[in-house]
Image (tube, coloured by chain):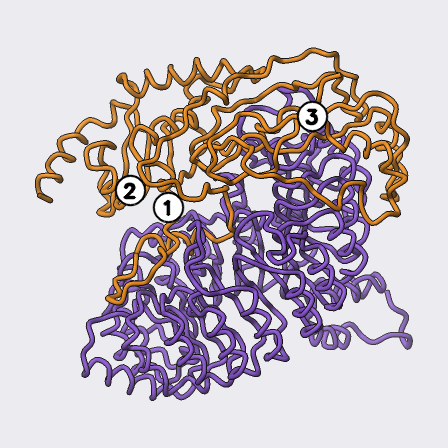
Amino acid sequence: MPRMGYSFPEEVLEHVFSFIQSDEDRNAISAVCRSWHDIERWSRRRVFVGNCYAISPKMVIRRFPEVRSIELKGKPHFADFNLVPEDWGGYVAPWISAMASAYPWLEEIRLKRMVITDESLELISKSFKNFKVLVLSSCEGFSTEGLAAIAANCRNLRELDLGESEVEDLSGHWLSHFPDNYTSLVSLNIACLGCEVSFSALERLVGRCPNLRTLRLNRAVPLDKLANLLCRAPQLVELGTGAYSSELRPDLFSNLSGAFSGCKELKSLSGFWDVVPGYLPAVYPICSKLTSLNLSYATIQSPELIKLVSQCQNLQRLWVLDYIEDAGLVALAASCKDLRELRVFPSDPFGPEPNVGLTEQGLVSVSEGCPKLQSVLYFCRQMSNAALITIARNRPNMTRFRLCIIEPQAPDYLTLQPLDVGFGAIVEHCKDLRRLSLSGLLTDRVFQYIGTHAKKLEMLSVAFAGESDLGLHHILSGCENLRKLEIRDCPFGDKALLANAAKLETMRSLWMSSCSVSFGACKLLGQKMPGLNVEVIDERSPPDSRPESCPIEKLYIYRTVSGPRFDMPGFVWTMAENPALRLS
Amino acid sequence: MSVPLEHDYIGLSEAPPSMEGSERPSERTSGGLNLKATELRLGLPGSDSPERDKGMVAEDKAGYPLGVLKSLLVVSGAKRGFSDAIDGGSGKWVFSGSGGSEAESGKGGNLFSPRGVNGAGKGGLVGGSEGANQNTGLGGPILKDGVVPQSPKPSQEKKPQLSAPAAKAQVVGWPPIRSYRKNSMASHPPKNDDDTEGKLGSGCLYVKVSMDGAPYLRKVDLKTYGSYRELSSALEKMFSCFTIGQCGSHGVPSRDGLSESRLMDLLHGSEYVLTYEDKDSDWMLVGDVPWEMFTDSCKRMRIMKSSEAIGLAPRAMEKCKNRN
């Protein structure tokens, strides 16, 4: 009980705390003293759980009774690339049912890489009267039936974003379940849906929601319907087209062009599946206002791409296929001086030969010409240390650098040396680097550079790299801010892992697959570190059916306060000494 | 002391397979003893010239090379070092001496068994340790020199014969492209009149496969198979452990021989049939339509009990007739 005269009344503190949004700050506040801890926990409205197994729903609810917004992440990142077997986990159902009773005023649910069922969707739609935001990023396990429940029951829904989820398309009629008097939609992203949605329902919905800012259509929406939609929603800020193809017709073109011109607020474009280049000029009128352009499904060749991006002087984010080629990136560098983020995806990643003229030069050009460039994802087929050094020197403000040289262990194509020095330059010059993905031929040396310089690094992805445990040791002992580490196909084994076991408790998670970690080491780790869940994934047979020194297939280690999980499938084994001692 | 097997890391060439990687003593052996001494150096001895010759490694078309790791050093005395390191809690790089023999880990080929994902698994070679003097260095007992005979399984494993010319062998999950993107590009090739060179990343097409009674399902990439035979053989391997009730307790390779043929019997006999859901959401028997038509229209598969599959065959035939 605070002594009067020495502190503010609770109401004042609460009011002050309400201005503090960041989790870090709030965590700091709650550590000041008992009463601040109590006041803070009652006033925390937003909770982010980076690993849904790190804590139980009950614990969250116990600590933060008045939450309005929750974000949960499930599967490890490598699940995106099919490295995590089906049915591994990430089920949101226990969270939804716990929150259904505990948080009647919940407004927002954001999930990433989680499994959510139609039952959960229905429960959400019926339990939270003021439900506003549902974002499902790379989720799965549900169908359009669940969406129908959301549409039908969430009277105050503002945002429905299906991200890149895998949705079972049973019917396109779910959209018609939005009642006629429902008008509060602000953001709708259905780009991932395969089937046709009822188009007239969509038109009516768009027409009656005056606050609609974001509309991302799916591929099934044909081009000739787009103009109509745009005319009903000229206030749109973000648009994802459907299929951008049709036989060339002048009337269709002029309608489209007119509709685009009418959208004075449009800043972001995406979609563009099946592009017929003849229709691209329809967007020219709005290019100069665009800040974000996602052409990564658009099979447009370099000349058209150049014409397009040259008009987007205010572009901040560009996602594009490697059809853009080096020449296109030069044009980009010349025109888009405000560019912050570039992602170049491969058009033919599995082809044996390069099919486009995209090399390391393109990235060098952009690094030279775009002073604000800080986030890069780049797929290419050749790289050199010289190029990486140039990029590093040009862009010390880089914060996210993900390079994927398509051939594993490809050396510097000019010198045939490993790319250690190039990546070393990246971490040395880019002192604020938070995320890094490596590729190409790399020895332990690159990890020494990373451990020495990458002090702000939070996430590191490693594949087909390194030579010995020393490599892993450099990372774990050097990268002070490391939160997520994912490794595949590297000769890292027990030594570095065991010697740096304590480090693992300071990180969110570690993934290692196709490395050399033995079952015995996993068991030891599980026994010695009760604050970690050490999970061995092995689809061959139980790991204890082999000698302890045998390497396991995959390993996922994460810190947790709620002990081993109970929903593991048959191919996941926990190394906890006594799984029955699960804390709830 | 046995010579450590030197396996290439990831060989992705199309060279005809040689089953084992080249055998030569690993430099790791001597390097390991000096790991502590080299702590302050820039790299391990020999790290300046990594030898990674490609093309030495067997692979199957599914894209997963068999031999993988360079021989791994396990130093016996290190076990104290590990516990010390952990109890000490400082995460210091403790490495107490060597002593004992160097040994290598179990056959690396197992690591890359892509069963659940890529379909054409290695038949679950669980490969016991083949090295001598296995020492876990982890506080466990020093294993005797009980050598599990190296399984001949991988050498005899049939590789799916592809009708298409050999494209680059695919490694699971590499390049790191999301399934969403891959499926997006694969399912709708461009209808552009001006033709583009280069395919549209039509490298894979993942569909889920479930089996009645199995506790979990798998995903397979239909593009990695060229025929029904390859697909069925891959599925047999994937689901064999379900039909015999549990996976082998000793990981002895021969179990797979037994279970595969048993599953084969089951599949070809009357107990199970392979079915798929097509684009019209109808369930059909696998095998009735030409392979390409199947891969174009298959959304997912189900290994169904025969008793439940009654009535599928006639529908499939009718549908074909209606199409033609």
User: Residue A182 or A492: which is nearer the viewer?
Assistant: A492
Relative placement, left or right, of B3 versus B213 is right
Location of residue B25 in the rendering, given as x and y in whole percent from the top left corner: 72, 27
- Indicate the chain on which mark 2 is placed: B
CA neighbours of label 1 inside 10 A, class few (<14), some (14 to 19), many (20+): many
Location of residue A212 in the rendering, given as x and y in whole percent from the top left corner: 40, 77
Residue type at mark 1 is: Leu
Of the image marks 2 and 3, the number of the one nearer the N terminus: 3
Location of residue B229 in the rendering, given as x and y in whole percent from the top left corner: 31, 28
Of the image marks 3 and 1, the number of the one nearer the N terminus: 3
Give me the residue at 71% from left, 32% from top: A522
Q: Under tag 3, what secondary structure? A: loop
Contact check, label 2 and label 1, Cβ < 8 Å: yes
Residue type at mark 2 is: Thr
Q: Where A23 sits versus A536, above or below?
A: below
Letter of the chain in orange: B
The residues bearing labels 2 and 3 have C-alpha atoms spaced at a distance of 40 Å
Quadrant where the N terminus of chain A is found in the figure: bottom right
- Disc on res. B105: 3
Residue type at mark 3 is: Ser
Of the image marks 2 and 1, the number of the one nearer the N terminus: 1
Q: Under tag 2, what secondary structure? A: helix
- Indicate the chain on which mark 1 is placed: B
Letter of the chain in purple: A
Quadrant where the C terminus of chain A is found in the figure: top right
| Residue named by callout 2 | B295
| Residue named by callout 1 | B205
Relative placement, left or right, of B12 versus A265 is right
User: Residue A162 or B202: which is nearer the viewer?
Assistant: B202
The residues bearing labels 2 and 1 have C-alpha atoms spaced at a distance of 8 Å
| Tag 3 and tag 1 share a subunit | yes
Relative placement, left or right, of A484 versus B261 is right
